Amino acid sequence: MLTARRRFAPAAVLTALLTSVAGPALAAPHNVILFVADGLRYGSVTPQTAPEMAAVKAGGVDFVNSHAMYPTLTTVNASALATGHGIGDTGDFANSAFAGQPPLPSVNPGLVAAYEDDVVQGDMNARFAPSYLDEETVLAAARGAGLQTAAIGKIGPTAIQDVTARDGVSTIVVDDATGHPEFGGLPLAPEIAKALKDTGLGTQAPDRGLNQDPGSYNRSGVIRANVEQQDWFTDVATKVVLPRFAKNGKPFVMVFWSRDPDGTQHAQGDSLNELVPGINGETSLAAVKNADNDLARIRQALKAQGLDQTTDVVVVADHGFSTISRQSATSAAGKMLFPLDVKAGFLPSGFLAIDLSKALGLKLNDSYGLDVDLKGGFHPRDGGALLGDPAKPDVIIAANGGSDLMWLPQADAKTLAPKIVEALIAEDYISAVFVDDRLGSIPGTLPTSAIGLKGAAITPEPAIVVSFKSFSTGCADPLMCAAENADTPLQQGQGIHGSLSRADTRNFMAAVGPDFKAGFRDTAPVSNADIGATLARLLGLSIAPKGKLIARVAEEALAGGPEAPTATRREVSSAPAAGGFVTVLRQQELDGHAYYDSAGAPGRVVTGEP
Ligand SMILES: [Zn+2]
């Protein structure tokens, strides 16, 4: 429900809003736009590279101690932004995860589901009804309170913002699959479809065109940002949705999820097989600018609609980014030949699955349960795999770039887990290992509860989570030139994220508007879950939580709020394994909340510290 908490809104604005809100509320909230620049590193924003974002940061709040949630993946952070809860509560443990048995209808017979998909999300909601997140989202609560709501942009994280609103009517949801029933696109309300037609935009999202093809081991990837597709999303936001919201007069919340720079950084062709320039080439810079242009157009539209004084604009990235390294001196998979699609001497996707399969003597199957013919030059294409009998796998592996997650569904998980850990920590590409508390304390590892993955989640919890090795390729700010081993079909020199390095946890974050301090440098740690909780506060929403991993409201960033509080920094080290391997977790603590900076064995992780 709306509550009276508007503190410093000009009287004229309050009066104008009051007249348009039904019910007994004494004050209406300001409008909120959450603009997510997917995969935007904090250091990528300068007045030259991204003038609009730099202006938001300079004019409003600069969150200099920002944190993505771990694993540093898109849907994981989308769930935190959407709910204001930690990942142990939302249960969105990774972009690709084991969704339980039997296989979801949309991925059958595969056991690993990719959540960046509207159909998969629908299947997940059906299995874990009413929603696999099992927490009410900010957008859903805002809608319940009578606000106007919309989510526009990249498929996956966009629909997660109001994960149960799949009818087109309750919340406006527009993503890559809009107008494409063949991709399971969610419907548009008839009046929105008509408005799109009347504006000449059409009702079908364009594809990524020349931004789509990541190339291969001997062919460079894209050299063009995701301009056309995002221009369409921005047109939808600025020419249809915002004018409609302005006309109706009620307060609104709009989430805009820009695929750039993430999609372009992943697929860019500036650095084939080379670590430098990696994700710092011209194409990645163009992607940062593309996202910045979209933000500028949205802020111009706010001004044109007379909404700029009454709208808070929060700009965040879901996670940071790194350049891919495909090299390892220890991996058995790295010594095999995959002439079809892997440069000789480089790691194939699925390297962890191949190495574990050999170490444990368990049969290797891909995530669909199909045999993988290693001698024939094949490897698990998406990295995911089932070890053992595919009908009753001992280990289910989901590859997620800078981290891999494992589930041990059989009864002997407690005896299998130490063997897996022993095999993993012998590899030079492993940086940190986390094991489900229920499997006991294993030397060299920390429990998954130590990184916020134990909560009220109703989806299958991972048994083992590993973060891969990261290192600086040599520059003044290591967070801007980190490389990491990654389980992905992409090439060395392209972009990735997902690890618990500071390069991947350090995301861009800034906010400007009537509810935020102006020209304020927030030195307190702030996470994406905190942003979700802070938005709920701004909107005056009270959301009944199910889990206890409730994020902190960044009071210090709000107009009239206190000074930035000081966090305590702490290092948590595992017991050493027989060979000396330790997982060291660096975190900050504030008011009972933990913020994970980085984790890894000494020398195997970019910490951001000198
Ligand atoms: Zn992302």
Image: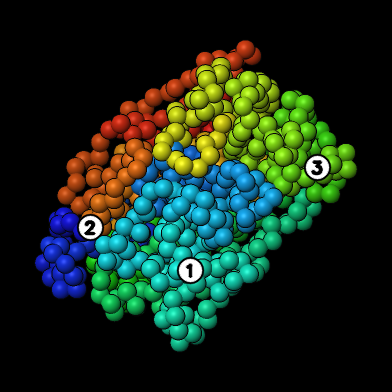
Asked whether the beta carbons under mark 3 and mark 2 sit within 8 Å of each other, the answer is no
Question: Is label 2 in a helix, a strand or a loop?
Answer: loop
Kindly indicate the quadrant of the structure image that contains residue 57.
bottom left
Q: Position of residue 192 (x, y in %)?
A: 43, 78
Q: Which residue is mark 2?
A: 1
Q: Looking at the picture, which amino acid does disc 1 mark?
A: Val
- Residues at marks 1 and 2, CA–CA distance in whole angstroms: 26 Å
Q: Position of residue 585 (x, y in %)?
A: 47, 27
- Residues at marks 1 and 3, CA–CA distance in whole angstroms: 38 Å
Asked whether the beta carbons under mark 1 and mark 2 sit within 8 Å of each other, the answer is no
Q: Which residue is mark 1?
A: 174
Compared across the picture, whether 86 is left or right of 61 comes to right
Q: Looking at the picture, which amino acid does disc 2 mark?
A: Met
Q: Looking at the picture, which amino acid does disc 3 mark?
A: Asp
Kindly indicate the quadrant of the structure image that contains residue 4.
bottom left
Per the rendering, the mark at residue 371 is 3
Question: Is label 1 in a helix, a strand or a loop?
Answer: strand
Kindly indicate the quadrant of the structure image that contains residue 224.
bottom right
Q: Position of residue 50 (x, y in %)?
A: 45, 59
